[in-house]
Amino acid sequence: MQKIEVADSHTGGEPTRVVLDGFPDLGGGPLPERRARLDHDFGRLRLALTTEPRAPLATVLALLTPPTDPACATGVLYADSGGSLGMCGHGTIGLVHTLAALDRIQTGHHRIETAVGPIDVELHPDGAVSVDNVESYRYQKAVTCILPDHGPVTGDIAWGGNWFFITHSAPAPLEPHYRETLEAYTRAIRQALENLGITGEGGAPIDHIELYAPLQGGDADSRNFVLCPTLTYDRSPCGTGTSARLACLAADGALAPGEIYRQEGFTGSRFEASYRPGTRGIRPRIRGRAHLTARSQLLFEPDDPLLEAVNWNPDGF
Ligand code: PYC
């Protein structure tokens, strides 16, 4: 029977599953090559680890892999039930918290290698984690696509470690009561972008859609709703989404380097963000907290009909 050791946590409500042992060897070479092998050769196992019955919806996998750069504490590949991810902000906060809880890293500064480049992290004495994300930038401003049921929607395309379409257009307030409406709307945007061939740089698919609404007079600057490749929403304020949004604000001259931006997510959890200038865009810093939820051994009995969760849709029953 196959057994896989995992440690689960959540960052502002969004689950992260760190795979500690039992995942097949992804081989050596640069991390983008290992990421491609994860997508091509281990898609079904990735699904089994990120969907029911073994994982809550929205789970992001953090697969530990040896770094190519000896200065890095670890390498990591991120993935969810929609596929692999370049980077994951909430997942990095969850990873650092988990490694600290397992006594594998101490308070202070560390470097981690991801499939889209090295990132620096700081584990603070109070347990908070800051992530100095990969360079983030706005690729295109004010791109319009037409939605069959909603008409034109205009937004920016930006990179924050994943590709985002970011817009303040929304058919309803960004409140839990309207979740289904917002999910349907952001899924329609994603589909329209795909149909129109609107992509990130180099033809990369835009697999994250971010709606935002400025908040005035509260203790956060903005609230967001982020549709992930899982086709459900991010329970956290989304680290890569906050990075992409910061890149747009910086490009518009609406946020100064070092200024604190408080991003509230759809469930009300918060990240604190700021940036320093980069070469092409900005270097965002995202600060948040994670909490452990479980340490377990996942079991895969050979006669389990749901060994691979592919095509199993519990909502369909
Ligand atoms: O926090 O960057 C993030 C993220 C990406 C997908 C889900 N969370």
Image: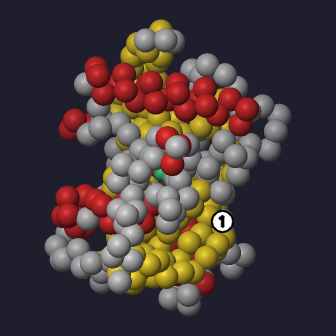
- Quadrant of the image occupied by residue 309: bottom left
The number of discs equals 1
Q: Is residue 259 left or right of residue 230?
A: right
Q: Is residue 77 left or right of residue 175?
A: left
Q: Residue at x 53, y 77 (%)?
A: 7
Query: Where 51 sits versus 295, above or below?
Result: above
- What residue does disc 1 label? 289
Q: Whole-percent x and y of residue 103?
A: 56, 90
Q: Looking at this rendering, what residue extends furthest in the top direction?
A: 151
Q: Residue at x 70, y 26 (%)?
A: 173
Residue 224 or 13: which is nearer the viewer?
13
Q: Whole-percent x and y of residue 270?
A: 69, 51
Report whether residue 101 is seen: yes
Q: Whole-percent x and y of residue 228?
A: 47, 44
What is the three-letter code of the residue carrying label 1?
Answer: Arg
Secondary structure beneath disc 1? loop
- Quadrant of the image occupied by residue 112: bottom left
- Quadrant of the image occupied by residue 39: bottom left
Q: Residue at x 64, y 72 (%)?
A: 293
